[in-house]
Amino acid sequence: MQKIKSLMARQGLKSPQESMADLSPVESFRIPSKEEMRELREQPIDPQAEQEIIDSIEEVYFSNDSFDMVQHELQKLPPELNLQELEEYRDKLKRQQAAVSKKVADLILEKQPAYVKELERVTALQTNLQLAAVICTNARRQLSVAKEGFTEASLGLLANQRRRQLLTGLLKSLRTIKTLQRTDVRLSEMLEEEDYPGAIQLCLECQKAASTFKHYSCISELNSKLQDTLEQIEEQLDVALSKTCKHFDVSHYTKVQLAYTLLGKTQTAMDQLHMHFTQAIHNTVFQVVLGYVELCAGNADTKFQKMQYKDLCTHITLDSYIPCLTDLCKALWEVMLSYHRTMQWHEEHDKEETAPPPDDAAAAVSDELVVDRSYVKKKLEHGLTRIWQDVQLKVKAYILGTDMSNFKYDDFIVVLDVISRLMQVGEEFCGSKSEVLQESIKRQSVNYFKNYHRARLEELRMFLENETWELCPVKSNFNIAQLHEFRFMGQCRSPSVSPSRQAVSSNSLVQEELSLFQQYLQEGNPFEMHIEHKEEETEDVLASNGYESDELEKSVYQDYDSDSDVPEELKQDYVDEQTGDAPLKSVSRETIRSKKKSDYNLNKTNAPILTNTTLNVIRLVGKYMQMMNILKPIAFDVIHCVSQLFDYYLYAVYTFFGRNDLYESSGLGLISSRLRTTLNRIQESLIDMEAVGESVGVHGPAEDRKEKVPSPHLSQLVVLTNSGTLYGLAQRVVATESLVFLAEQFESLQSHLDTMMPAAKKPFLQQFYSQTVSTASELRKPIYWIVAAKAIDYEQMLLMMAGVKWDIREIMSQHNVYVDVLLKEFEQFNKRLGDVSRHVRIPLPVSNVLWEHCIRLANRTLVEGYANVKKCSNEGRALMQLDFQQFLMKLEKLTDLRPIPDKEFVETYIKAYYLTENDMEQFIKNHREYSMKQLANLVNVCLGSHINKKARQKLLAAIDDIDRPKR
């Protein structure tokens, strides 16, 4: 029947019963009887017409939903009923019903054989089911018999034994659960003892045991508790890990690492460790700076705690700056040392765990360990740079937070030294060049040094203007290395002592071989301040008066027994302590007299000639070099400023003692072109001429003038016009020779400066030495020429020579009086030189220059006097030679200077009186050192009576040709 329905569904039809069920009682269709069905089948109906009738049935009749056909048809009725239309519609429905019934009947007849066959199978199945019921009944009967016949007691015994075994297992499980419940007490004890590996091992074992008994409801709560405990252990482990950032302890760190290994979180531990180091750096520097800020503020104001670190740094006072910086570096050193020791621990730990694995399982674990170790190694190596970068940024913020331009020099040097030491730590820590620190300290240094140098130049000007150019008494073995400003040059750099305060120790070489991390691995700190060494620094440079018994030497230095004329600043720098040197022995008068005539040394000592100002400049150079030694990036700026110190000193000495308009007219070439170029360069680049009213032309920009210094003025206490003192010769000697001494010290420092100078700037240094330093000794000529020009009355000699009669007719055996007068002038000059040398040692080069100038001027005066002769005979020329020979003979007894300067100048001129016309023409061409007047005199006086007017005019024209280029 179901198949019929499905077939009808596929055909879009319903069974007659379903169709009838859909009709309401109002209109029930009568089910056709067999006879009617047969009639329907027998009626010849066109299949196509039948199909059309079925197709005309509305679709709604074939729906599977609950469909009320009566309600449907009633709703279709029109508002006004028509009986005829209703009957027609009813007939239509009947035809449709008849067509459907006939179709159903046909389908039933068509499927009847299959239905019969299926019915037979159902019947056979029913029979088989009845047979199975019989078999089951028999089986139950037999099972009942077996139950009654089997020993119920035996089965009961087995059941009881099984129950006993289960209970025994349960009891064991309960005991284990009881033990697990008590483990939290032991875990707490282990955590208090900081036995993290043991606590984690116990906790993991408990978790493993708990998972075995997870079927018990009480275990689920215990599992949760153990998990909470494990998390608590991890938190405490993280705190323990953070403690190693400031104070590394091997046993403590070993426990922590083992604990993380048990947790399988080695890589996580390393990530956490780096985070803690970063936090430690921040917290450390903040607490250090905050402590000093609050200490200096003097109140309990909490506003500082809420500040950013960068803003906090700006509240550091000048007095607390260096202690705070030192403590800051000490604290950061501890952090970096902990990191260094952490890396050491891992390196040693890795070496211990490199044994080969025994089996495959261990090999797998070993591979995992290798991966972990590789990760840790890379993380630690990467962390070096990161940690150092954090340190640099913190220190940079501190450095730039304060304006250091008003710091004292020693304080600034300490700051530079601390930062230099920190950069050394950075280089050893991770090989960094510390660009961040270098840039920040360079900014501060350039700013500080610019202000410092400006103040020192002004101070130097003040020193020079108040300098009386008296000798500063220093020992004969004085050397700049004895000044504490230069001690940094000859000493090995000990890491615990600043470069300005190092002490040579026996283990300095050993210390130099060790890195800072090796030296201070267990104890100590490279940033420990050693300010107390400053008190121990001594200088033994001043001459001690160990010769009071000798009146001569006592008189020489009597002016220096008191230091009343020494500025206070220099008094502080001198520390006159005995170093065991034997006192200088006094020298007898006879010994002094036995010395060469032109050596005006006191023979007691060849102590350097220098002034307080010279010593001050040398100290400044030492300070500048200290700064340059610590801070290489500003080396060029510092060396440039060092050169300005020398330039200004040289310019001052020249301005005070050497400037004279008569140089050019003298024709002696006193100022070389190199010296003149140097002086012009100094005047243009360093001297503010506008400030002294010497320039009314183009004014330079304000910025350029700020870099310049006014020209110094000679102290009014220095008198250079007194003939009794040889026109201030003592002061001139002290000034000039102190400059020469200063130049010698610069020469000795050249190699050291060259090593500090950047390669690109070395030509500047070479030019400074070749064109400036080397010209210092050249100032002797112009400075001492002024003394030589005034010390002897050359004009008087010219007047006396003019009164001599040279056209005599007989050869004279007696020289003229003017020679004796001139020699007496030289004797007086020699005596006055001796008087001056009693106060100031006159070095041999100085006395030679003085004698050379005097002799040269005297000889040129002689030639000038001979050139003024109107008439001269051969006997007169012979007298000239006699006079000159007498002059030379006596002069050689007064001076050791050989050869006598310009001796040939005079002799050649006298001999020219004997030349013929042709020889004279050649003489004029070859001897351009003579003036036009002198040459003209030779032509007019000597040859005047031997040559005609035309020849004379020719020779005079030749002289004029020679003189023309000069004009």
Image (spheres, rainbow, N blue to C red):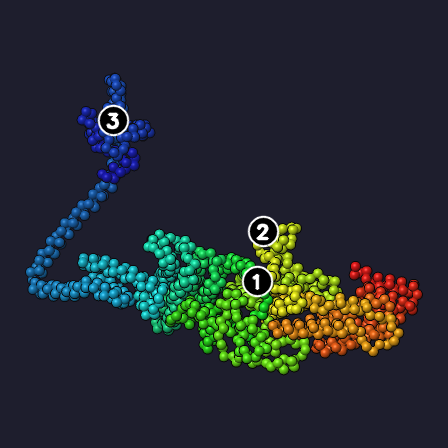
Q: CA distance from mark 1 to mark 2?
A: 28 Å
The secondary element bearing badge 1 is classed as helix
Q: Pick the residue in front: 610 or 196.
A: 610
Q: CA distance from mark 1 to mark 3?
A: 135 Å
Q: Which of labels 3 and 2 is toward the front?
A: 2
The label number, if any, that marks residue 604 in the structure image? none
- Find disc 3 in the rendering and name its residue: 72
Residue at screen point 29% across, 67% down: 197
Chain-order first, disc 1 or disc 2? 1
Residue at screen point 70% across, 68% down: 791
Image position of 687 (left or right of 797)? left
Image position of 488 (left or right of 743)? left
Q: Pick the residue in front: 940 or 819.
A: 819
Residue at screen point 76% across, 78% down: 889
- Find disc 1 in the rendering and name its residue: 466
- Please identify the quarter of the rendering in which residue 904 is found: bottom right
- Please identify the quarter of the rendering in which residue 722 is found: bottom right
* Amino acid type, label 1: Asn
Q: CA distance from mark 3 to mark 2?
A: 114 Å
The secondary element bearing badge 2 is classed as helix
Q: Pick the residue in front: 26 or 593.
A: 593
The secondary element bearing badge 3 is classed as helix
Residue 14, position in %: x, y?
25, 33
